[in-house]
Image: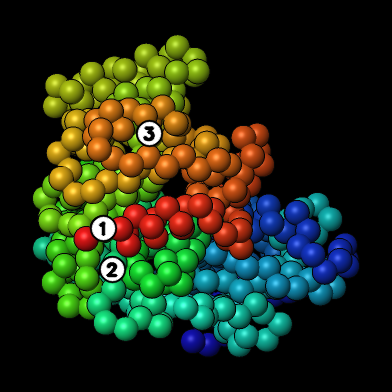
Amino acid sequence: MKKLLFILALILSLPQVYAQAAEPGIYRIALSKFTLYYNRNQPDSIFNMFAADVKKDLPMLKNREMISELQVRSGRLQRATFTTLNEGIAIYRADFQRAVLSMQISINGAGKIGGLLFDNYRGQNMVKPVDDPYTTETPLELKTLSGAIRGTLAMPKQASGKVPVVLIIPSSGPTDRDGNKPKLNQQPDTYKLIAFALAKNGIASLRYDKRLTGEVITPAKETQLRFDDYIDDAVMLAGALREDERFSKVVLLGHSEGSLVGMLAAVSQPVNGFISVEGESLPGDKLMSEQLKNQPDYITKGFKQITDSLRRGKTYDKVDPSLYSIARVSVQPYLMTWMRFDPVKEIKKVKAPTLIIQGTTDLQVSAADAERLKKGKSDAKVVMIPGMNYVLKEAPAAQAANLATYNQSALPVKPELVSAITDFVKSIK
């Protein structure tokens, strides 16, 4: 690709406001906004971030064209890793779906973008990706009637003979194979870190992008998505792993929403074990109602009107704008299919050995969820991990510090998590 294809604005002669080598917070804030707007296809919002002289040199229509071209050629912006700050210009390694580029950004004294440049990545003055010494990763693609699922198979480098494999089923929301949610600007790399840790212990893993996320190829739209689609994907992937002669046993690991998906898949496809990690115990409508209980009455009542309609098999068109992000009309068919499953009832049907893992500082799923799941399957083993949060990392209970870990890809997953998974997988016959 030619360099000129990625120039959104020339790096201009700006006052050198910053001279430190560390990433200033103002750059991180600007980059987070840019990533959000870029991935949401909101070029005009990006345009409004520019300084006046940049807007003059790069009019709105031209900006739209260049953003569109970047999206077509490179795909979504999955992460941007800060490397250096030189005379007010911050340099990042920008990892897109289909390309790795060098990103240079300059912020003026008013907090506006004074220059933004995307260039071919050459690895100079950039953080190079570190190959895990214990892991060999290869891309995997599974074609389905509705498209293709794409993921990454991580194999232990030192493995000899057949090895166990863990299928990592992603959490709720737009979660990709590495456990990141670029649309929400969350990049903890949770699943990638689990994969590396398991490989070190002689266990293979497969992680994959959810539908409508990452590199999944499907013509389907949000209005066509159903909870059963996630179950079908997990069943098909588990079946493919069972047929692969490299693997001695197949274990499903479902995180958050993936826990329910894993339960249902474990019933449909014979597997050797099932692991629920931070798994919710309530049906979808009750779970969301619980999360909204501290909101104003008009929000809780509005959501109840929606769920009451969905229980009758009908979508609800008069959605309050405050509920659009979670219950807009286009997502209601998915909610309708999700609501009909009760995790406590479904886990009873799982015949395979079961492990329930729960962190004590999870802000989204509580110890009570683990206890309810345990009541549903009395022979399941429960492991409570002190200080582990929703993204499976060490975190305090304080909300701000806890949520900060959602973007700390360098922070490892809790060692107790790895030990619990490893011991369980190796104990299964």
Residue 143 relative to residue 85: left or right: left
- The reply to whether residue 176 is in sight is no
> Badge 2: few (under 14), some or many (20 or more) residues near its Cα, within 10 Å?
many
State the residue at coordinates (78%, 58%): 24
Hey, what amino acid is under mark 2? Pro
> Badge 1: few (under 14), some or many (20 or more) residues near its Cα, within 10 Å?
some
- The reply to whether residue 382 is in sight is yes
Q: Which mark is residue 164?
A: 2
Count of numbered badges drawn on the protein: 3
Circle 1/circle 3 CB separation < 8 Å: no
Screen quadrant of the C terminus: bottom left
Q: Quadrant of residue 72?
A: bottom left
Above/below status of 258 relative to 83: above
Residue 427: image location, x then y, percent: 30, 58
> Which residue is most to the top?
297
Q: Which mark is residue 428?
A: 1
Q: Earlier in the sequence, mark 2 or mark 1?
A: 2
Circle 2/circle 1 CB separation < 8 Å: yes
Report the colour scheme: rainbow
Disc 3 secondary structure class: helix
